Image (cartoon, grey):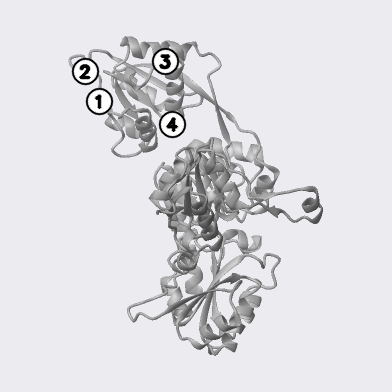
Amino acid sequence: MNPTAPTHPAYGHVTFLGAGPGDPGLLTLRAVEALAAADVLIADPQVLDVVRTHARSTVDTPAQTVTDEASKAADIPVLRDTANLVMTAARSGKRVVRAVLGDPGLDGNAAEEMLACADAGLTFEVVPGVATAVGVPAYAGVPLRDGQGGDVRFVDARTATAVCWAEAGASEATTVVSTTLDSVVAAAGELVSGGRKPDTPVSVTAAGTTTRQRTWTATLGTLQQVLKAAKVLPSADGSQPVIAVVGERSAAERRERLSWFESKPLFGWNVLVPRTKEQAASLSDQLRSYGAVPSEVPTIAVEPPRTPQQMERAVKGLVTGRYEWIAFTSVNAVKAVREKFEEYGLDARAFAGIKVAAVGEQTAKSLIEFGVKPDLVPSGEQSAAGLLEDWPPYDPVFDPIDRVFLPRADIATETLVAGLIELGWEVDDVTAYRTVRASPPPAETREAIKGGGFDAVLFTSSSTVRNLVGIAGKPHNVTVIACIGPATAKTAEEHGLRVDVLSPEPSVHKLAEALAEFGAARRDAAVEAGDPVTRPSERRPGSRRRARS
């Protein structure tokens, strides 16, 4: 008899899912599918944020801890019986995802919960994940095996017995120890007592696979001194998990050559992205690929126009055939038209017979998500000027209608309007949305901006400069200032900011690339000089390097 076969058809289904060691990008495709279909999500606290982004907004996420009066007084949360949480949800016909750190096959608690489901006749599946003890060394630049092969041992310091330490100490195998920061020196001592030589290389990685990752290399005999010299020990955060790899593959000179993750150009940099959340998404993803930690702080809020009649007439004109073209100059313009369409019960089919232009790739992507494939996107510069370069002049023989609908912001420039008129087109220049200054960010963010807590800030327009300074204050002088173009740089300088990075093109992605090149050059200079690689926020204000001319 299959122990996982359901005895009650009305029962739901449980997916035991490995969420990996911390990097959201390490989730498998099957894991993302299961999360998207979940009715109930029960996740280890360490990975809740990693998996919740792939679940529906309506997913139920019951807490694994409860607080009663006694535990509140003792400041100790009481663990709930997770197996019962899982089974109760499944018995009610729900699709349950139980997400664990790393891989469920290496998680003892998950194994017990699977057995409980099997005994209860509940159907379940297992979606493997990247094991922490394997994924973290890979991100630290410490392959566990090479061409010469060799054995690998895994030791969990929390449950290791004296016999386990003696066997690991007597072995020459690469040993991966799961422990905590304040216990790793003791683990090294256990291995030495078991027979490992004190000069055996060891690497210790905290917050592995995340942009907070830090790795220290030493030997078993010098580990305590190295961690003390790095001011890691003693630590108030000594209970944080770490992965220690013991063996020749952890040698410092070898790891330096293979440290692909921590050597990213902006690794660990806190970068402020002052844009609307919708605009910041793709830029933040790009910054993460460089190792940065983006913080999205909206400086501009988007609101409907004060008088909607003009927009309403233009949308009706789309349906009645008034226009030959519609030109979208921003994602927000697409959103404004889409919302007006939905208000009238229209969809993308209303664009039939109308040529559609998009000012750049992000605007084009937004249109495609709406179900509209743009006919014209700039082949060169992603801007109004670039769009005009490719825009065809009006030809009365081939163009039955000479009018263009241009939905845009209330503060947009007249470049596109003037250019289209020069090409012979009539333009209905319509305010589709208003941009207003956003509310101030939380006090903690404002203090970080003014106090040097951010390593860099990306300014994508003059208005982002004015609005950020207005709602949060001027960035500290250690913060690297990156601007999208000369006009934005001039505004930044007028506000007393020194511009370090200027994008070669008016593109947010080119701006991010320019900041990454700046970070890489800064890192290379530190390595060449024999100095430790630090982030701008870790330097004293007086030591800030002069901006490049």
The answer to whether residue 269 shows anywhere in this view is: yes
Secondary structure under the numbered disc 3 in the rendered image: loop
Vertical arrangement, residue 370 with respect to residue 533, above or below? above
**The residue tagged with tag 1: helix, strand or loop?**
loop
Residue matched to label 2: 395
Mark 1 lies on residue = 392
Q: Nearer the viewer, residue 539 or 182?
A: 182
Decide which of 267, 386 is in the foreground and name it.
Answer: 267
Residue 102 position, x and y percent, is 50, 60
Q: CA distance from mark 3 to mark 4?
A: 21 Å
| Upstream in sequence: badge 2 or badge 3 | 3
Residue contact between numbered discs 2 and 1, judged by CB atoms under 8 Å: yes
Query: Which badge, 3 or 4, comes first in the chain's sequence?
Result: 4
Going by the numbered disc 4, the residue's amino acid type is: Val
**Residue 215 pos. (x, y %):** 54, 70
What residue sits right under mark 4 in the picture?
Answer: 331
Q: Residue furthest left?
A: 397
- Label 3, on which residue? 345
Q: Earlier in the sequence, mark 1 or mark 4?
A: 4
Q: Residue at left 80%, top 56%? A: 74
Instruction: Kindly identify the amino acid type of the residue bearing the numbered disc 3.
Output: Gly
* Number of residues whose C-alpha sits closer than 10 Å to that of mark 3, classed few (under 14), some (14–19) or many (20 or more): few
Task: Look at the numbered discs 3 and 1 and tell me whether their residues touch, using CB distance below 8 Å.
Answer: no
Location of residue 498 with respect to 487 vertically, above or below: below
- The local secondary structure at tag 4 comes to helix
Q: Determine which quarter of the picture holds residue 325.
A: top left
- Of circles 4 and 2, the one toward us is 4
Dot 1 amino acid type: Pro
Q: Identify whether 253 is placed above or below 312.
A: below
Name the side, left or right, on which 262 lies relative to 321. right
Residue 540: quarter of image: bottom right
Specify few, some or many for label 1: CA neighbours under 10 Å numbering under 14, 14-19, or 20 or more: few
